[in-house]
Image (cartoon, rainbow, N blue to C red):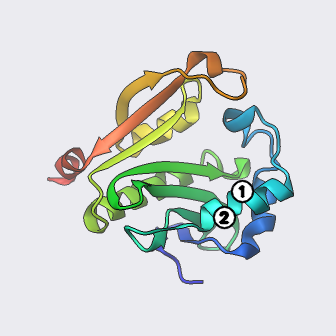
Amino acid sequence: MRPFLETDRLALRPFSEDDLDHLVDLDGDPEVLRFINGGRPNSRETLRDRSLPRLLRVHPCWGTPGHWAAEERATGEFLGWFEFRPLADDSPAVVELGYRLKAASWGRGYATEGSLALIDRGFATLGVERVVANTMAVNTRSRRVMEKSGLSFDHAFTGEWPEVIPGSEHGEVVYALTRADWAARRRP
């Protein structure tokens, strides 16, 4: 399958139905899901019936998906996925950035590398005006990726969540990057 985007080390390609086993492996690791649902693995049925259709969804304003399977270019190994999806079906102006990678690939710069490439593509060719990302306030690793990708702290919030998980009492944080700020950092 032809990649949507390549970096030095990553190939980001559209998901297919054949990726279900990859998702089962990824979402079977409690550490990967620690800040998502407290570390409870998602069932194969949930991934097949709810997650995979979301990952396959094509967004009308782009005609492309908003989630990308991430593979290591050198080996073809599935590493996880990236989200770069418009928040409104009819406009690419505001997109949400996200990532979920295998724990074995953490600390190697993949999340930052993929995020930077998607951000650059979004502002340069996809009509994006603002990129937002959020995570639990206590998820320092994800917050660091957001910062290294050029996003800045925007605001914190708390909400009523369906489940309380460790750390949720500290709320969530939102980071953002505008086209103007992206362009300013690219100028010599």
Occupied quadrant, residue 12: bottom right
Q: Secondary structure at mark 2?
A: helix
Q: Tag 2: residue type?
A: Pro
**Residue at image x 69%, y 66%?**
78
Occupied quadrant, residue 177: top left
Q: Residue furthest bottom?
A: 1
Q: Tag 1: residue type?
A: Arg
Q: Which residue is mark 2?
A: 53
Q: Position of residue 50 (x, y in %)?
A: 72, 56
Q: Position of residue 83 (x, y in %)?
A: 52, 55
Could you classify mark 1 by the number of other residues whose Cα lies within 10 Å: few (under 14), some (14-19), or many (20 or more)?
Answer: few
Is residue 18 visible to us here?
A: yes
Q: Is residue 170 above or below residue 48?
A: above
74 horizontally vs 45: left or right: left
Could you classify mark 2 by the number of other residues whose Cα lies within 10 Å: few (under 14), some (14-19), or many (20 or more)?
Answer: some
**Residue at image x 61%, y 22%?**
160
Q: Residue furthest top?
A: 169
Q: Which mark is residue 66?
A: none
Q: CA distance from mark 1 to mark 2?
A: 6 Å
Q: Position of residue 26 (x, y in %)?
A: 75, 54
Mark 1 near mark 2, Cβ–Cβ under 8 Å?
yes
Residue toward you, 107 or 80: 80
Q: Which residue is mark 1?
A: 50
Q: Secondary structure at mark 1?
A: helix
Residue toward you, 77 or 166: 166
